[in-house]
């Protein structure tokens, strides 16, 4: 009997992903968890969900690890999302907000790192093979949104209407470039100064998640914006992008 | 050198508790963690924070344990868990960054309860991973008070002139929901080490208990009522000096 590959993540990993910008498009190409499971000779349990943040990703993995016999599990993967998202469940159904209305970026980053460490600790203690990685960047999207919102008159409130503006090309001023750099460095220091910075182990692919610390977020690191994404409007990985993600992760897993 | 007793919890445990209802009262009596540390000949690190929920309690213990390099210096870890519906977050640049709301504005009692139980399991796995002696328990009820009708906050009592019997309304089916919540706790029984969880399964209807209810209440005409000798007043049920001593003795007797 095949062992299970259990994956939790956000829209980049969601088997049921549909593009809100291209509703006519069929997005039923195989996603990286299914492709990876095939390569590894495992059955895939992909519990990823569009819009998910770290709490959804962690909680759903943790709950599965309580109920599935560890002997059946070949590998567990957490494909982490952006820090500001807020997940919660109502009547056992998970939903999410793009931005947590409580707390600040320092808290959201620290909360994320606690989830990363808790996931690592859970798998180590239960002796379950695991990997984790940052699929999309922890905070760059948030900074970019702050910046574009500040320079855009009448920015729409609705996120779907904001995205075309966010994804358009922007010629930043020197002040804006300096501000962005300063804020990024401030947020990176939160990761660096965290008690978990040196405690996250090599099972975290691309740790500490940013190129300035010689890490990376996998989608940013591997996907070519011109060939591997759905469109300029929708940056989710297309069929080619999903294959690239699966191959990259496969190489990382078998070579470590 | 003395070993460390590391404790986190809410206002029943915090050494900075001030009674809003009795602002003239000096509440600087020793709290149960300090009394327990004396009894155990340990040095006390009391992380508890007034008003806090279970995310704070887990996060504060996780952060503290991870900043202590010599894990052998830790003699005992205690988590005195709070109510499930509270929402904790960090915000701002002040020294005390953690803030809490009495009721999370997102989600429902079932999701909050699951989140709390994941925190219980996380703490257990952390302590087991580092081979740290630990115990955990509900200091106050996890979900029963929310279901049966929360007392208004002390601030609300003053502002609205409520008497001690006033309760907030719960818009659900109390008896059915209590059973559903109990069933949720049993879903995690395979992982949770109940030997180290005092009062498990935490709900009185099923022979569990929370420590404050067990220690600070007495039976009159077969009904549990707060023991006025052990609490601040009829309006403020927090333990007084004698109540703190009783809590310490009860916990000490059950450390094994």
Image (cartoon, rainbow, N blue to C red):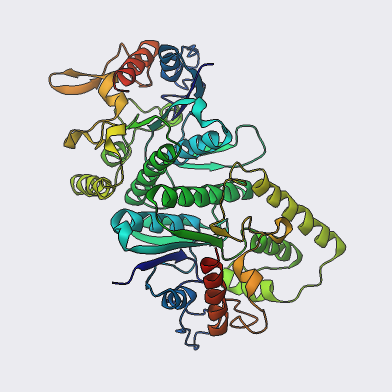
Residue at 56% across, 51% down: A201
Screen quadrant of the N terminus of chain B: top right
Residue at 69% across, 68% down: A154
- Would you say A139 lies left or right of B245 here? right
Residue A43 falls in which quadrant of the image?
Answer: bottom left
- Would you say A223 lies left or right of A61 here? right
State whether residue A126 appears in this view. Answer: yes
Residue at 53% across, 57% down: A203
Location of residue A192 in the rendering, given as x and y in whole percent from the top left corner: 67, 47
Q: Name the foreground residue: B224 vs A255.
A: A255
- Can you name the residue that lies furthest to the left here? B221
Location of residue A135 in the rendering, given as x and y in whole percent from the top left corner: 57, 66
Q: Name the foreground residue: B64 vs A72.
A: A72
Location of residue B65 in the rendering, given as x and y in whole percent from the top left corner: 52, 34
Residue A238 falls in which quadrant of the image?
Answer: bottom right
- Can you name the residue that lies furthest to the front here? A255
Screen quadrant of the C terminus of chain B: top left
């Amino acid at each position: 009997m095949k062992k299970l590959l259990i994956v939790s993540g956000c829209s980049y990993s969601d088997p049921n992903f549909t593009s809100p910008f291209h509703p006519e498009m069929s997005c039923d190409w195989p996603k990286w968890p299914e492709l990876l499971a095939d390569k590894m000779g495992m059955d895939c349990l992909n519990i990823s969900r569009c819009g998910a943040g770290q709490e959804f990703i962690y909680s759903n993995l943790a709950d599965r690890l309580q109920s599935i016999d560890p002997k059946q599990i070949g590998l567990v993967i957490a494909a982490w999302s952006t820090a500001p998202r807020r997940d919660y469940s109502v009547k056992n159904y998970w939903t999410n907000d793009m931005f947590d209305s409580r707390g600040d970026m320092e808290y959201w980053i620290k909360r994320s790192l606690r989830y990363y460490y808790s996931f690592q600790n859970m798998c180590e203690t239960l002796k379950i093979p695991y990997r984790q990685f940052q699929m999309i960047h922890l905070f760059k999207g948030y900074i970019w949104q702050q910046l574009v919102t500040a320079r855009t008159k009448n920015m729409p409130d609705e996120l779907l209407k904001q995205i075309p503006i966010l994804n358009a090309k922007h010629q930043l001023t020197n002040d804006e470039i300096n501000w962005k750099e300063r804020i990024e460095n401030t947020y990176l220091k939160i990761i660096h100064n965290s008690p978990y910075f040196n405690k996250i182990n090599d099972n975290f692919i691309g740790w500490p998640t940013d190129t300035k610390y010689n890490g990376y977020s996998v989608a940013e690191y591997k996907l070519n914006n011109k060939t591997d994404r759905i469109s300029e409007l929708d940056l989710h990985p297309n069929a080619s992008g999903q294959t690239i993600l699966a191959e990259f992760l496969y190489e990382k897993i078998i070579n470590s | 050198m003395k070993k460390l007793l590391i404790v986190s919890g809410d206002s029943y445990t915090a050494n900075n508790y001030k009674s809003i209802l009795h602002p003239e009262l000096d509440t600087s009596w020793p709290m149960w963690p300090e009394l327990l540390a004396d009894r155990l000949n340990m040095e006390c690190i009391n992380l508890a924070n007034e008003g806090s929920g279970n995310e704070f309690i887990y996060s504060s213990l996780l952060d503290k344990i991870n900043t202590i390099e010599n894990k052998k210096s830790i003699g005992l870890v205690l988590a005195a868990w709070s109510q499930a519906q509270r929402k904790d977050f960090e915000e701002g640049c002040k020294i005390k960054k953690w803030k809490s709301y009495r009721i999370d504005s997102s989600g429902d009692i079932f999701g909050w309860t699951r989140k709390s139980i994941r925190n219980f399991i996380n703490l257990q796995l952390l302590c087991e991973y580092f081979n740290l002696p630990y115990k955990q328990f509900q200091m106050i009820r996890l979900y029963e008070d929310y279901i049966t009708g929360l007392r208004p906050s002390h601030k609300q009592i003053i502002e609205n002139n409520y008497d001690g019997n006033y309760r907030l309304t719960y818009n659900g089916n109390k008896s059915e929901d209590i059973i559903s919540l109990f069933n949720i706790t049993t879903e995690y029984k395979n992982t949770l080490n109940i030997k180290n969880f005092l009062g498990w399964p935490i709900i009185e209807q099923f022979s569990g208990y929370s420590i404050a209810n067990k220690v600070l209440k007495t039976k009159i005409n077969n009904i549990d009522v707060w023991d006025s000798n052990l609490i601040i007043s009829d309006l403020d049920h927090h333990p007084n000096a004698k109540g703190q001593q009783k809590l310490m003795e009860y916990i000490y007797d059950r450390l094994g």
